Structure formats: structure tokens, C-alpha cells
Image: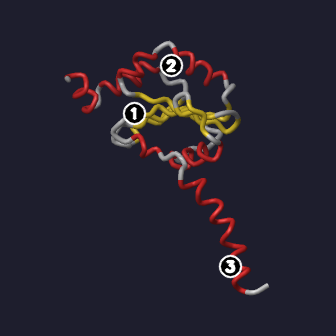
Amino acid sequence: MNTASRFLRRLVPVLLWFPITAFAVNLDDYLWKNRLLILVAPGISDPVVEQVRDKLESQTQELVDRDLLVIQLFRHGQSFIGDRPVPVGEAEQMRLQLDVDPDDKVLVLIGKDGGIKRRASLRTDLGEIFRQIDAMPMRQYEMGK
């Protein structure tokens, strides 16, 4: 096998990989548009996840008022950005961006400025999260408009 053939054999897998990652979800896509509430857990059927999801469903207006987009990242089962399913590779990429272990059970709050505002247990009271958001200067400005 000549040098050109070896080079092409190495290049083709890289080219095949590139388009997939080039269009992967990037949390920076939500800068200045949404606050992000990210639920990370090993699986979608975890009882704690189900409790948090039930609470979130009952507080839809609070989420809308605060421009809060819920992202659910699971190691096992379908992950979501809002209601949109996220491919496994993209969910893994987001976990890497957040520096969370796939087996963690955490809640991450990201402000519109892209900064992590809170990293806490999934059992954290949503009222605390809403109060924290309401105390943020940008949210204060939004409420004053």
C-alpha cells in the first residue's frame, strides 16, 4: 500500500465523523435567549427524575416567564432539549461541556450569559431555583419592562 492510500484510509473516517460533530448541539446556541435548567441522570426512569419532571410540568408558566428551557440528559434512554429528542452523541457532548459524569444526578442552572449559576442535587426545590433566577440582574430588568 502506498503512502497516498494510507493517508486516504486515515482521512476518510475523519471526514465521515466531521459532519456529525459540526452540527452537534452547543449550549452557546442559547446565549442571551434562554436560561437553561439541565437535568442530568443515569436514566429517564429514575424516580427522582420522574418527580422533578412532574413538578416542572405543573409549573409551565414559571418556566415560560423566566425563559427557562429544560434539557434532560440521560445515559440510558432518550435525552431531550425541551420536547426535542437529542441523539446520544449530542447528549454525551453536552455532558462533556458541563463536565458532569453520566452517572451523576444533578441539576445545572445556566444563565442567559452562559455562566453556570447553580450545580445541585436533582432533589433541589424548584422554588429555590425560581427565586435565584428572579434575583438575577437580567431577570430584574425583564420584570421591570
Q: Identify residue type, mark 1.
A: Arg
Residue 127 vertical position relative to residue 92 in the rendered view, above or below: above
Name the quadrant of the N terminus. Answer: bottom right
Query: Would residue 78 appear left or right of 133 to someone viewing this image?
Result: right
Residue 100 on image: x %, y %: 56, 44
Q: CA distance from mark 2 to mark 1?
A: 15 Å
Q: Identify residue type, mark 2.
A: Leu
Residue for point 28% across, 28% down: 139
Q: Which residue is mark 1?
A: 35
Q: Identify residue type, mark 3.
A: Phe
Q: Earlier in the sequence, mark 2 or mark 3?
A: 3
Q: Earlier in the sequence, mark 2 or mark 1?
A: 1
Residue 54 vertical position relative to residue 110 in the rendered view, above or below: above
Residue 133 on image: x %, y %: 34, 27
- Give the crowd class for mark 1: few <14, some 14-19, many >=20 residues within 10 Å: many
Residue for point 42% across, 44% down: 29
Q: Which residue is mark 3?
A: 7
Q: CA distance from mark 1 to mark 3?
A: 45 Å
